[in-house]
Image (tube, rainbow, N blue to C red):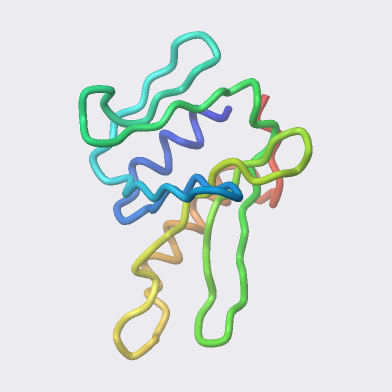
Amino acid sequence: MLKQILEDLLKIDDILFIVKNQGATSEIKGNFLTIRQKDNWITIGDDKGPCHMHINADYILKAKFVIEEKVERTSYSVMFFDKNDERVLAAFFTKMYDEDKKLNQKRKELFDNLFNKYGKQETIMTN
């Protein structure tokens, strides 16, 4: 299930993947990235390219569709968590607003379609 969700996210333009911990943050734009899986490891991007990530599919137990209300806008993302409920990876939908701070309904529809595809459940168990 994890690989399928990641594949679906990679099909959407302007997705920003963020890997974050206390010591570092890595941001990778999803556009044009490849995905493959060998055993429990999912690789996004090309090993020989400028950036890629390896995800241990056994380590990520759930995905959450997150809508965060902020002061001037609402943020839309899919976040991936480990057994301790720590966020391992997040995929943010970017370019959700125009220069007048109006929500781009087509971008929101992409988020809604993905949410609907996975049963309209906020939290999905990935393995």
Residue 39: x and y, percent?
A: 51, 9
Residue 19: x and y, percent?
A: 50, 45
Write down the quadrant of residue 117 in the picture.
top right
Q: What residue do we see at 61% from left, 53% from top?
A: 65
Closer-to-camera residue (85/101): 85
Quadrant where the C terminus lies? top right
Looking at the image, residue 51 sits to the left or right of residue 78; the answer is left
Closer-to-camera residue (23/100): 23
- Residue closest to the far bottom: 100
Vertical side of 89 occupied by 92: above or below: below
Looking at the image, residue 54 sits to the left or right of residue 84; the answer is left
Q: What residue do we see at 52% from left, 58% from top?
A: 112
Residue 21: x and y, percent?
A: 58, 47
- Residue closest to the far front: 23
Residue 40: x and y, percent?
A: 55, 14
Looking at the image, residue 2 sits to the left or right of residue 28; the answer is right
Tally of numbered tags: 0
